[in-house]
Amino acid sequence: MHSILERNRWIVVAGGILVQVCLGAIYAWSAFTGPLAREPFGFTALQSQSVFSVGLVSFALVMALVAGRWQAKAGPRRVAITGGLVMGLGCLVAWAAGANYWGILLGMGVLLGAGIGLAYVCPIAALVKWYPDKKGLITGFAVAGFGFGALVWIKLTQGFVFGPVRLTGDWAGLYGQGWTANQVWLLYGLLFAVLVALGSSVLVNPPAGWRPRGWVPPAASTRPTGRFELGVRAMARTPSFWGLFTTFLFGAIAGLMVIGIIERFGNDRLTASGFLPDEATLVAGTAMGLFYALANGLGRIVWGWWSDTLGRRRAISLMSAAQGVVMISFYWLGASEWGLYLGATLIGFNFGGNFALFPAATADLFGDRSVGTNYPYVFLAYGLGGIVGPQLGGWMKDLSAASGDTSVWMWAFIPAGVACLLGAGLMMLLRQPSRALPGAAEARVEHRAA
């Protein structure tokens, strides 16, 4: 296996992308929120967003507490395959739960998120080692599949022809028989288990001491180096860690809130602007299922590529500032069809960039070899954002429905936009940790032992 991958390391990229496409199914949750509001489910907006939030928190916690250290010891392939199996199990539990809220919360929240958390870091950890010469770009490719996966799974849910099955927004079409959400989850569970195992088969680390042909590691004095290794405890004592964490938190609040509520917000805002309900539903679904999802995948590649030239600190600051401006404007953009498309595109593009830039920045600041164990702790910001963002959006939806006033929606977007602008300023203050940091020597020893 190693001899083949050393000749063509793009095989590892292809495997990582396939895994990430499956993991991106969590971003298809907005396609389920409409059907879950109807019988036999009858979920409130806050209930459906709670399932999404629990999934995101489970994702982040399992990645930080289990996956990072486990893949460092057992290798990325075994951990990623386990993640696919747990995802499949979660979908099977939700299928068996019928309309029971707690069963769906367990299956599509806790277990699906846990499976994603196990598998997510594995392609990143492997590819940073295979591509020390192109960390930003290749991390972007690795996680682009996650963004594009949302497009695949949303479209499969809403209307793509899949074999003999035509799924519409209400899951009707198998020879005239209606599909329930549970049946779609059964199909997803089987696909996740098989496809993640297939992609994971090439997720192995390079041999010890391997480096790309012709590549010379940067001198120890250059920045960023990715050669100064800090373990988790030493990393957590640096201002750089908390700067990354806070900025990622603000970006996650903005992006995850929009993912969770864009279809319901778009429907409300467009209807209030004179669109017929069916037209508003179609436009809002297109904004998420096409524009946001495509831009989310592209943003991961493009921002990663730009960061290799601009530097990670400047790229994250620019991305956060752009996101802040768009979020503050999004309520007004959403009043028209093309305004909603534009806002969804820009928010998706900037949100996607987080997942290329923050792992690469973690490697730059705290070491390439340590990124598999360190990045999951930076990624806890995403889990916290997954609580705040979707819950804020769900709360505003319920308030809007109760009052009949769609202007309530702006108080979901404006605070998130202001937070992103604060994150942009915070990143400009970020500095490389000092080699003289207390505890750094112990951290390097700890990492080698792991």
Image (tube, helix red, strand yellow):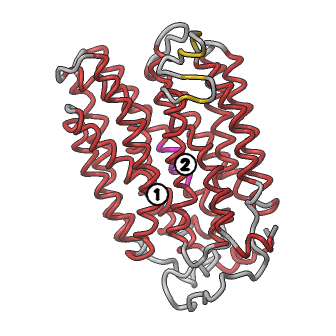
* Residue 361 in sight: no
Q: Identify the residue at the far top of this view.
A: 39
Task: Answer left or right for 291 relative to 85.
Answer: left
- Quick one: SS at disc 1? helix
Is 339 drawn above or below residue 80 in the view shown? Answer: above
Is 53 drawn above or below residue 99 in the view shown? Answer: below
Mark 2: few/some/many CA within 10 Å (<14, 14-19, 20+): many
Magenta segment includes 227:
no
Mark 1: few/some/many CA within 10 Å (<14, 14-19, 20+): many
Type of amino acid under label 2: Phe
**Residue at 49 percent of width and 21 percent of height:** 168
* Residue of label 2: 146
Marker disc for residue 348 = none
Q: Is residue 437 or residue 184 the one in the foreground?
A: 184
Magenta segment includes 381:
yes
Residue 190 horizontal/vertical position (percent)? 72, 32
Report the magenta residues as a range. 379-385
Q: Are marks 2 and 1 in contact (CB under 8 Å)?
A: yes
Q: Quadrant of residue 73?
A: bottom right
